[in-house]
Amino acid sequence: MRLAATIRGVRYTFDSVKEVLAKANPPKSGDDLAGVSAREPVERVAARAVLSEMTLQELRYHPVVPYEDDELTRMVEDTLDEQAYAAVKHLSVGQFREWILETSTTGELIRSITPGLTPEMAAAVTKLMSNMDLMVAGAKCRVVVRANNTFGLPGRLSSRVQPNHPTDDVQGILISAREGLAYGCGDAVIGVNPATDTPESTAEILRVLHDLRVTNRIPTQHCVLSHVTVQMKALDLSCPMDLMFQSLSGSQAGNKAFGIDVELIDEAYAMMQARGTGAGPNCMYFETGQGSALSSDAHHGADQVTMEARCYGFARRYNPFLVNTVVGFIGPEYLENGPQITRAAMEDHFMGKLMGLPMGCDACFTYHASMSQDELESLKVQLGAAGCAYLMSMPVGDDIMLNYQSTSYHDIPSVRMLLGKRPTPEFDAWLSEVGIMDGGVPGPRFGDVSVLK
C-alpha cells in the first residue's frame, strides 16, 4: 500500500491510512482543532491522490480505531456481508467514486453493496467528491422504511415537527404541534426535545402527542428525545411510544460519554420491537453530528467525517425509521461557517444513505457560527434536491428551548413546491382530506389550526 505522493516535485509521505483520511478532508475547524487536518492545500491534494488509489479492501483492514480497542469496529467487522463486500473490495476509492456516479449505476445497485461497506469506505469516497457529486450520488440512494407511514420514497420530502417548550408545558407543545401540522409538516415524526429528562415527563408528553395523533387520525409517528434509558423506563409506565430515540457517536469512548453502548441499544431495540406502538417494523430514531467524538476527546486522532461515518455503521445495526445529522448544532469549533456547514450536510446525507439509512438533516446553525439566513435557506433547497428524506420544522425556524436556528414550518411547503415534492403518501392523503393541502399546493384550510382537535 502506497502512502506517499509527489506533487510538483515535492514528495508528501503519510504515516497511516488514518492520516491520509484526515488530510484528504476538506477544511473543517474541528479537524484544525484536533490537529489532524492538512497543513496546506497541496498536502490535501497529495492525500487525495494517495486515497484515490487505495482499495476498499485496504480500508477494511485499516479502521481508524483498532478492532481490539473499540466495540463499534468489532461490530462492523463481525457483521459485514461478505458477498456484498466481495463485489467491490477490489475497487480503488477513485474507481468506487466513478462507479457510484455512473449513470448506469442505479440506486438499487448501490443498495445491493451497502451491507458490504465499512464506515471508512463511505468516508473515503466522500472525500473525493465535490458538493455536486454528493448531491447526485445522494439522490440515487433510496432507503424506504415504514412505521405508521411509508418513508423515503422518491419524489417525497418529509419533515419533523419539533414543538419544543422550555418548561415542557404540554399545552404549549400541543399548540406548536398543531401549528406545524396545519402547514403540512410532521409526516416524519412529531418529536419533542424535553427540558425535563424524567420517565414521568417523557410519558406525559408521549400520551398527549398520541392522543393528538389518534384523535385526528394523523398517519405519522411521535417521539420524545430523552435519554434512551429514560425512554425505557417510560415504557414501563405503559405509555405509547412509536419511535425510540438516541444520539450516537462514532467510537466506543464517544458512546460511553453519551451513557450508551451496543448492549444497551440492543436491549432498547428489543424492547421497542416487543412494545412499540408503531405499525411498521422500523422503530428507532437516531441523531448524529460531526464533531461529537472530538468534543468528548473520543476521536482517536481521526477526522470528524470518518468518525461521523462510523455513527452510521452503528445505526445500521437497528434498521431505524429515522436518522438525521444535526449538522450545525455542535458549534463553530467544529464547523465554523456557512460553507463548512453546507459541506458537512452534503457529506453526512450521502454517507448515511450509502450506508443504507433513511437519512434526514437538521439544516441549522448556532448563533455564534458565521452563517447567514440566506445560506441556510440555500442549504435546505440543496438537501431537497439531493434526495434528503426529511428536514426539521419549528415556529419561524427558531427553537426557543435549544436556542439555535433551523427550518421553519413555512419553509417545508416552500421547498416542496419549489422541487415538486410531496409528503409521505399516507400523510399527503390526510392533508388533502382535511383541506390543508390540495395536491401539491395549499388548500382552503392551510395554516388553520382549528382543523385539528
Image (cartoon, rainbow, N blue to C red):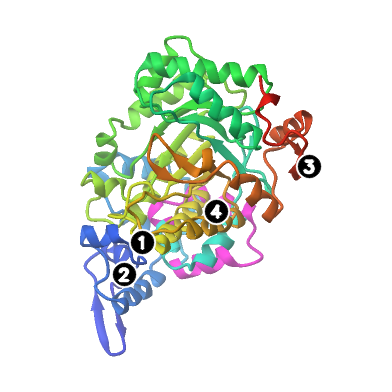
The image shows residue 155 at horizontal and vertical percentages of: 69, 49
Q: Earlier in the sequence, mark 2 or mark 3?
A: 2
Mark 2 crowd level (few <14, some 14–19, many ≥20, 10 Å Cα)? few
> Which amino acid, by three-letter code, is at mark 1?
Glu
- Marks 1 and 3: which is nearer the front? 3
Secondary structure type for disc 1: helix
SS under mark 2: loop
| Horizontal and vertical percent position of residue 238 | 47, 9
Question: Label 3 belongs to which residue?
Answer: 439
Determine whether label 1 and label 2 are within 8 Å by CB.
Answer: yes
User: Position of 267 compared to 426: left or right?
Assistant: left
- Residue kind at label 3, given as amino acid type: Gly
Mark sitting on residue 329: none
Specify the quadrant that holds the N terminus. bottom left
Task: Specify the quadrant of the image occupied by residue 326.
Answer: top left
Q: Which mark is residue 58?
A: 1
Q: Quadrant of the C terminus?
A: top right
